[in-house]
């Protein structure tokens, strides 16, 4: 079963919010955390690549994968993403314990014009809520809320369960969060849920982002 894990998820693994010709139906509410807004917003760092997870951050035996040229959403549930939600810059990294069997970690950082990141999060939340069940290339998939601790200024977590052409299933857990005008997405693809690993990698990714803010503002 694990041998075809990537085939079960690959067609939709780069989607941060159920895009690519999806056929959505409404489902349960997505888990969202929204801490109170801060009076002062730090300027977004410019060298966002420095905050990406690197191969040195991975356990021994993991390998770096091609993250893909499109590192931001182009659609949400089949609808084009509004212009104000498209980042001015983005960076991505991806790693696998085994390229065929997984697990696979995807890390993406988006830099927006001032104020656009909060709009982006609102669009993602609306899109996620309306994308409970859909089809990607004719194969069934579903998205549900995932209970997860608050990250950054606001965050949301989802679990995507996708089936491939021969009926085998893969799971992609995803946490999206915002710090100032930077948006972040971290995905963990596996054949079975691993919330503890997801929490560990989100914490590492967010710590690197906080360190970059501190470095550029010191």
Image (cartoon, rainbow, N blue to C red):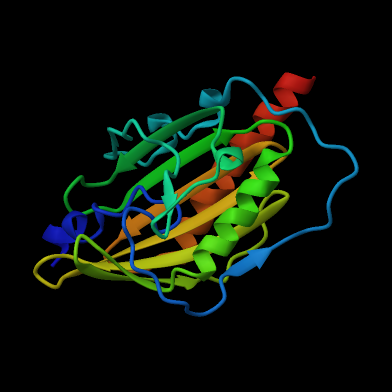
Say whether residue 154 is left or right of residue 197: right
Q: Position of residue 65 (x, y in %)?
A: 27, 35
Q: Nearer the viewer, residue 201 or 174?
A: 174
Q: Residue at x 64, y 63 (%)?
A: 149
Q: In which quarter of the image is the N terminus?
A: bottom left
Q: In which quarter of the image is the C terminus?
A: top right
Say whether residue 131 is left or right of residue 41: left
Q: Which of 93 and 197 is in front in this view?
A: 93
Query: From what the image shows, is residue 103 above or below residue 95?
Result: below
Q: Where is residue 91 in the image (x, y as percent from the top left)?
A: 47, 29
Say whether residue 138 is left or right of residue 110: left
Q: Which residue is drawn at 58% across and 49% down?
A: 203
Q: Residue furthest left?
A: 166
Q: Where is residue 74 in the image (x, y as percent from the top left)?
A: 42, 43
Q: Which residue is drawn at 56% across and 56% down?
A: 124
Query: From what the image shows, is residue 107 above or below residue 134?
Result: above
Q: Residue furthest right?
A: 39
Report the number of discs: 0
Query: From what the image shows, is residue 217 above or below residue 140?
Result: above
Q: Position of residue 47 (x, y in %)?
A: 58, 20
Say whether residue 114 is left or right of residue 159: right
Q: Which of 181 and 92 is in front in this view?
A: 181
Say which quarter of the image contains residue 114: top right
Say which quarter of the image contains residue 182: top right
Q: Residue at x 35, y 47 (%)?
A: 14
């Amino acid at each position: 079963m694990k041998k075809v894990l990537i085939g079960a998820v690959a067609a939709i693994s780069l989607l941060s919010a159920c895009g690519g010709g999806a056929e959505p139906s409404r489902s349960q509410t997505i888990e969202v955390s929204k801490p109170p807004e801060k009076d002062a917003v730090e300027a977004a760092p410019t060298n966002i690549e420095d905050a990406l997870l690197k191969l040195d951050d991975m356990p021994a035996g993991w390998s770096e994968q091609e993250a893909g040229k499109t590192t931001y959403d182009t659609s949400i549930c089949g609808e084009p993403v509004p212009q104000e939600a498209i980042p001015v810059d983005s960076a991505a990294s991806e790693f696998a314990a085994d390229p065929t069997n997984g697990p696979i970690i995807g890390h993406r950082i988006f830099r927006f014009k001032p104020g656009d990141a909060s709009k982006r999060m609102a669009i993602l939340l609306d899109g996620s809520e309306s994308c409970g069940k859909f089809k990607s290339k004719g194969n069934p998939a579903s998205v549900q809320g995932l209970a997860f601790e608050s990250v950054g200024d606001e965050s949301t977590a989802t679990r995507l369960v996708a089936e491939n052409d021969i009926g085998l299933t893969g799971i992609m857990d995803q946490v999206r969060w915002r710090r100032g005008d930077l948006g972040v997405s971290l995905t963990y693809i596996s054949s079975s849920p691993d919330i503890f690993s997801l929490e560990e990698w989100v914490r590492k990714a967010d710590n690197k982002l906080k360190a970059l803010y501190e470095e550029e503002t010191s």
